[in-house]
């Protein structure tokens, strides 16, 4: 995880890029399902950015495996068009498409047409790969994960030699519940070693998520405060304004709990709550994350709110409710929102609630972690007009902006003591002036160099599913949903979840 180490060592002066990452090794990057949206929208732009930064070896190539009847030339042109749109639609500071960089990358893009279940596909692939280093990226529906890995094993493509590594990157969803996640892990490990499996979570490619470790463990004034003595509670929010879009078939069988909580939300919680690892070694970091997830109390029914969006408006435009979306059952009980109160049973966090929420069609697109510190005693200000102090909050902004905000009280200028809330904000885009990125650059690069720190291990995956499994069990029985208007802050029941603890959510739309 070289990017984290580099961030931690950046200084306030202009020595911001003193730790230059090494170039990735030569090899082949194979994308199963590479003709799809994920490759066009995220993977190719990420690989282009790595090439532009000089982090890809001159002997690096890409092979797309898919069923479509297209030529390699047509595929390259399709990638070029998507990439051109990417670099011109990311704001005024977006970089332009450098034709020389794209030519070097595109000249090494090849195509293998074939079905994922057929032996001939892997025979053709083996002839192109030979004895090179190889990363297999499974940009396919989850039902193909086991099939592809089985075929990689049968064909010998998964076998590592002394000179060539073989690694597999697997997208979410990794299982649909605890039992299926365990079964998938067992199936993969029959063919691959754990060190060959890279279970990806794109949230961990966000700079702010990576920087949680740097903020906590490289700054002496944060870590002593990061405990139950000083922190009142933590709020984790992953809000979207989009609805189900064209994913009704997938979402109807998935819902907000399965889609977001055991992976994205649990990773954010683990990064926030974990103990300091003994090093930034991958297993040291992942050991501590797993310990946190295993320490979460079994969630209780009254600590969970499930919601579904009804008709409303987003940016002053009317939108239909979830049950009116194309392809959705008009009597659907699938949740598009979930809020939970979680308690961690360890010395650092005992008694500190972690409130998490995620949902679609909310007031704004926002992912953030809000660390609420305990209030100072009011006695000093009892004879002043101040009726309460500004809450001390550290906000870790993950998307759409990436940065950190500190909120605290300060005296308003004047002859009397009047306090006002002020904010100190650090924004990645303003300080580092980086070009547009997908969030996948760090993850792909780390896999190339064999650094699994930002990827999930089997026990980490299963620990996340154990947290939400009780919720999934309740959903088998008839359960009511709390409806909320599209464009709102979410269902009232979610507000009540905090109100009974005399707390309230931060505004999503603020």
Image: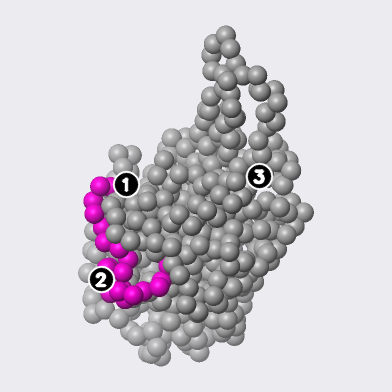
Q: Please name which of the two marks, 1 or 3, marks the residue nearer to the observer.
A: 3
CA gap between label 1 and label 3 equals 38 Å
Q: Main secondary structure of the magenta part?
A: loop
Above-or-below relation of 114 to 9: below
Q: Is label 1 in contact with label 3 (beta carbons under 8 Å)?
A: no
The answer to which image quadrant residue 160 occupies is bottom right
Above-or-below relation of 146 to 436: below
Q: Is label 2 in contact with label 1 (beta carbons under 8 Å)?
A: no
In magenta stretch: residue 330: yes
> Looking at the image, what colour scheme do you see?
one colour
Within 10 Å of the Cα at label 3, are there few (<14), some (14-19), or many (20+) other Cα atoms?
some
Residue at point 62%, 19% (across, down): 384
In magenta stretch: residue 102: no
Q: Disc 1 marks which residue?
A: 90
Quadrant where the C terminus lies?
Answer: top left
CA gap between label 3 and label 2 equals 43 Å
Q: Disc 2 marks which residue?
A: 326
Checking the image for residue 232, the label placed there is 3
Within 10 Å of the Cα at label 1, are there few (<14), some (14-19), or many (20+) other Cα atoms?
few
Which span of residues is magenta-colored?
315-336
Residue 356 location, x and y as percent? Answer: 54, 56
């Amino acid at each position: 995880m070289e990017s984290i180490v580099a961030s931690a060592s950046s200084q306030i002066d202009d020595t911001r890029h003193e730790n230059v990452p090494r170039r990735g090794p030569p090899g082949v990057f194979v994308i199963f399902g590479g003709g799809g949206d994920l490759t066009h929208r995220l993977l190719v732009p990420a690989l282009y950015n790595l090439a532009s930064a000089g982090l890809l070896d001159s002997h690096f190539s890409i092979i797309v495996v898919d069923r479509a009847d297209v030529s390699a030339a047509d595929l390259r042109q399709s990638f070029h068009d998507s990439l051109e749109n990417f670099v011109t639609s990311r704001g005024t500071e977006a970089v332009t498409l450098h034709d020389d960089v794209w030519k070097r990358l595109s000249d090494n893009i090849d195509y293998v047409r074939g079905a994922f279940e057929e032996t001939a596909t892997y025979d053709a692939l083996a002839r192109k790969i030979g004895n090179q280093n190889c990363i297999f990226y499974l940009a396919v529906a989850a039902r193909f994960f086991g099939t592809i890995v089985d075929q990689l094993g049968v064909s010998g493509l998964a076998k590592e030699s002394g000179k060539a590594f073989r690694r597999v990157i697997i997208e979410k969803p990794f299982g649909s519940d605890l039992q299926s996640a365990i079964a998938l892990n067992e199936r993969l490990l029959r063919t691959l070693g754990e060190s060959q499996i890279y279970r990806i979570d794109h949230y961990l490619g966000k700079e702010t998520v990576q920087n949680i470790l740097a903020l906590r463990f490289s700054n002496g004034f944060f870590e002593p405060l990061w405990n139950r003595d000083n922190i009142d509670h933590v709020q984790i929010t992953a809000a979207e304004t989009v609805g189900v879009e064209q994913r009704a078939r997938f979402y109807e069988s998935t819902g907000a709990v399965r889609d977001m909580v055991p992976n994205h939300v649990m990773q954010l919680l683990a990064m926030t709550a974990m103990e300091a690892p003994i090093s930034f070694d991958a297993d040291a970091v992942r050991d501590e994350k797993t310990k946190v997830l295993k320490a979460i109390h079994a969630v209780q029914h009254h600590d969970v709110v499930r919601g579904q969006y009804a008709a409303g408006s987003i940016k002053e435009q009317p939108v239909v409710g979830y049950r009116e979306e194309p392809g959705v059952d008009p009597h659907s009980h699938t949740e598009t929102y979930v809020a939970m109160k979680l308690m961690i049973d360890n010395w650092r966090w005992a008694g500190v609630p972690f409130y998490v929420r995620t949902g679609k069609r909310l007031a704004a697109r926002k992912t953030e972690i809000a660390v609420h510190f305990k209030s100072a005693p009011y006695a000093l200000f009892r004879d002043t007009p101040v009726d309460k102090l500004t809450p001390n909050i550290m906000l870790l902004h993950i998307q759409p902006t990436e940065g950190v905000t500190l909120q605290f009280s300060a005296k308003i200028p004047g002859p009397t003591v009047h306090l006002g809330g002020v904010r100190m904000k650090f924004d990645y885009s303003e300080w580092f002036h980086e070009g547009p990125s997908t969030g996948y650059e760090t993850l792909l690069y780390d896999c190339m160099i064999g650094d699994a720190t930002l990827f999930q291990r089997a026990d980490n995956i299963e620990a996340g599913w154990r947290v939400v499994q009780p919720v999934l069990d309740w959903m088998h029985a008839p359960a009511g949903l709390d409806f909320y208007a599209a464009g709102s802050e979410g269902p009232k029941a979610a507000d009540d979840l905090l109100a009974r603890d005399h707390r309230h959510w931060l505004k999503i739309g603020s």
